[in-house]
Amino acid sequence: METRQRRLEELGLLQALGAGNSPDSPRVAPTPPGPELSKETAWSIGIQVTLPFLFAGLGLSGAGILLHYFQHWPVFTEVKDLLTLVPPLVGLKGNLEMTLAARLSTAANTGQIDDPREQYRVVSSNLALVQVQAAVVGLLAAVAALLLGLASGQGLDVVEAQVLCASSVLTASLAACALGTLMVCIVVGARKLGVNPDNIATPIAASLGDLITLSLLAAVSSFFYRHRDSRYLTPLVGVGFAALTPACVLIAKQNPPVVRILKFGWFPIVLAMLVSSLGGLILNKTLSQPQFRGMAVFAPIMCGVGGNLVAIQTSRISTHLHLWSTPGVLPLWMKKCWPNPCSTFCSSDISATSARVLLALVVPGHLVFFSIVSLLESQSVPSERTFVLLYLLAGLVQVMVLLHLADVAVRLAWRRALDPDDHCIPYLTGLGDLLGTGLLALCFLTHGLLRTGVRPGGPLDPAPGPS
């Protein structure tokens, strides 16, 4: 293991020399250890990504149908801020499980989990870290939902606030435990089978994350709502997690990189949660209006597809940088020009190849998921051709923006010696939630205006008949 680490450091130093400013400095093009990611083709990437992506879409479609069903439950109709909580809490899966999957994928591709003893240390510390993050950010997400509700004119009920906070913390922790364990099994299994975990771990996290999180939120919040008259139930939940958190912190401190995340990795997750909460506010305000009928079904799909694809791209670029360079030093080919939309999608770089593959999955993927939802919920969703075109356009715009921002954000993070797995994925998935919800609301609004023949100035006057 130490020999492997020294080899990585030597490669990073050689790359730093190759990227030097002196014309006489040697320029070395080392061969990276582990899987030769730079030799992946569009075909091989597509084969590895497509099946997990479609599997993820099935989970997202199921999550959309569940949200459409859950929105009529008494707890969701009585505790108004619970709908505002859905995007940040579901997005917490992207901010925690996807970053966990990306960290473990990088560790697998660099050989850090090949030794059983090292594997146990890496896995246990990362799972403990995710538990701490889930409990803290789950509480902050509930507080943010309450504050957004107050800002929008809703009153504050103390009992409902306790139900909201307890439900958020317990749901986030249970989902983190289940999904974190699943991510460990997938990454370790992919490593043994010779498959790049970057291509499959994050889609599978997305496939089950929304379903598990929404189901847990509905079940847990309904339980607390039924027992809302109990004076000690919700305080006991808070005390229990307050006692559990220090033990998780001690376990996480076994791994120095995890300690750095524990100290300095809160800002990306909290900011991403706040951004996702704005998407939750949009969702809360639109679901009660008739022109947005069916939005609850499509919101998890739109947000999940964008977050899923950008997490794959970010994880791939991050792994590539970990193999070819050292934090703070960009490889030579990345220093030649600053990324623009053309270089993100049209260059010969392996990252552009994967971006094209991921973008090509958007339209057929959304069509498959749309067909599934329309088949199962035909009375609840619009199916006109105009809406389908607007929906596909919104999905394309969302993913194009996110993939380009991933190209920019990863380079900025690496130049500042920050790990993109931990500092970029939360921002991008949170922004994906806000972009997805906002574009979807705009899609429904535009479709409604086109159907009723309304222009910004007022209704259209009927064409004059023959005199």
Image (cartoon, rainbow, N blue to C red):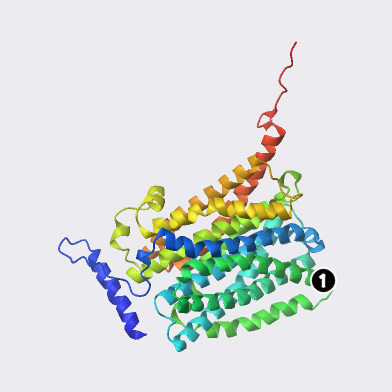
Q: Nearer the viewer, residue 280 or 437?
A: 437
Left or right of residue 38: residue 186: right
- Residue 466, position in %: x, y? 74, 13
Q: Secondary structure at mark 1?
A: loop
Q: Nearer the viewer, residue 420 or 188?
A: 188
Left or right of residue 167: residue 106: left
**Residue at screen point 47% across, 71% down:** 197
- Residue 190, position in %: x, y? 49, 75
**Residue at screen point 80% across, 60% down:** 78
Image quadrant where residue 452 sits: top right
Image quadrant where residue 40 sits: bottom left
Q: Is residue 446 above or below residue 286?
A: above
Q: Is residue 451 above or below residue 322?
A: above
**Residue at screen point 51% across, 59% down:** 309
As drawn, which residue projects farthest toward the top?
Answer: 467
Say whether residue 405 is visible.
no
Q: Is residue 260 above or below residue 270?
A: below
Viewport quadrant of the C terminus: top right
Say whether residue 404 is visible.
yes
- Residue 43, position in %: x, y? 43, 60
Q: Nearer the viewer, residue 223 or 440?
A: 440
Left or right of residue 381: residue 336: left
Image quadrant where residue 213 sits: bottom right
